[in-house]
Image (tube, rainbow, N blue to C red):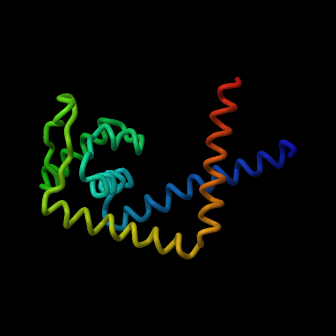
Amino acid sequence: MDNLLLTKELDRFYYLWRESIAIYEDWAKQYGLSNNVVMVMESIYNNRENCTPSSISHKWFIPKQTLNSILRDFEKKEYITLLPHPKDKRNKVIQLTKKGEEIIGKIVLKLRKLEFYTLNQMGKEKIDNMNDGLEEFIRLFREGGKNE
């Protein structure tokens, strides 16, 4: 492909990347939340057995200071408790309280319902193509970066 066509495709990719972030940010705003708060909620709710601040930070690339602020707010609202990690004294295990289970659960399940609706409308073939294409882009980008 020529560079002009590649540039147009990259512009489209960048636009879609930004839009995918924007739709989640807009969704979160409906509930008076930031996208980071919703992603932290998702991590806590869907990883109850071994959820730690560092696992959330690595999964979503949320700066530790931002994450700590969100977790302190959740503690203050009594959504979570932070317990000492049994194997790593420098880390904590995040545990949902009954109140957190209810409130965070409502938000996460509403988001999941919308995501499931969207994926069902797309169908398995388009979902597979979307994920396969992005996976290949990531692999090739990393591969190309090693060759520089």
Which residue is painted at 40% across and 72% down in the image?
A: 113
Task: Specify whether 96 is left or right of 139.
Answer: left
Q: Position of residue 43 (x, y in %)?
A: 33, 52
Task: Specify whether 46 is left or right of 101.
Answer: right
Q: Quadrant of residue 32?
A: bottom left
Q: Is residue 37 above or below residue 85?
A: below
Task: Specify whether 38 is left or right of 85.
Answer: right
Task: Specify whether 109 is left or right of 22.
Answer: left
Q: Position of residue 67 (x, y in %)?
A: 29, 42
**Which of 41 and 55 lies nearest the eye of the viewer?**
55
Q: Quadrant of residue 19?
A: bottom right
Q: Position of residue 90 (x, y in %)?
A: 20, 28
Which residue is painted at 19% across and 67% down in the image?
A: 102
Q: Position of residue 85 (x, y in %)?
A: 18, 36
Extreme-right residue of the structure: 2
Query: The C terminus lies in which quarter of the figure?
Result: top right
Which residue is painted at 26% across and 65% down in the image?
A: 105
Which residue is painted at 13% across and 50% down in the image?
A: 76
Extreme-top residue of the structure: 148
**Number of dots carrying numbers:** 0
